[in-house]
Image (cartoon, rainbow, N blue to C red):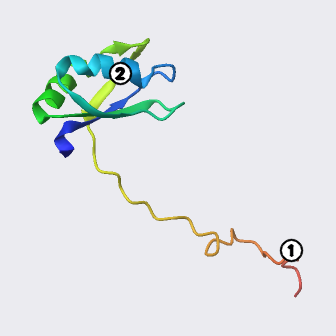
Amino acid sequence: MEQNKLFIGNVAYATTIETLVALFSQYGEVVESYKPQGKGFAFITFKTAEAAQAAMEALNGKEVDGREIVVNVARPREERPRFDRQQSSGGYNRSGGNNYNR
């Protein structure tokens, strides 16, 4: 199923997911779509890997709403280490005092 999911980058903020689904549906059945509001990317998942491949080849570099979109097979999300405020003191004394007591 991972070969069926495409990442679409360089999407204009004004472009709606409906616009993208209509465009990508020309190449096969879209089973899932996602575009965070105010972000320049989206994900489209096709029913078949063949449809995803056809859409990627046809639409990569195509202008949509004034921007050339980038279309690639989506990679699995990487786990990133969480930032722990407890471990990062920022190099200063957090007690509110100063470090000049010698």
Which SS class for mark 2?
Answer: helix
Q: Position of residue 20 (x, y in %)?
A: 35, 21
Q: Is residue 61 visible?
A: no
The residue that label 1 is drawn on is 96
Q: Position of residue 71 (x, y in %)?
A: 28, 28
State which quadrant residue 22 falls in: top left
Amino acid type, residue under disc 2 in the picture: Leu
Amino acid type, residue under disc 1 in the picture: Gly
Residue 20 - label: 2
Neighbours of disc 2 within 10 Å: few (<14), some (14-19), many (20+): some
Residue 29 in the figure: left or right of residue 66: left
**Looking at the image, which is closer to me, 37 or 100?**
37
Task: Give the vertical position of 99 relative to 85 (above or below).
Answer: below
Task: Give the vertical position of 74 relative to 46 (above or below).
Answer: below
Residue depicted at x 38% and y 17%: 19
Q: Position of residue 99 (x, y in %)?
A: 84, 79
Q: Among all residues in the image, which is located at the extreme left? A: 50
Which SS class for mark 1?
Answer: loop
Looking at marks 1 and 2 on the same chain, the residue that comes earlier in the sequence is marked by: 2
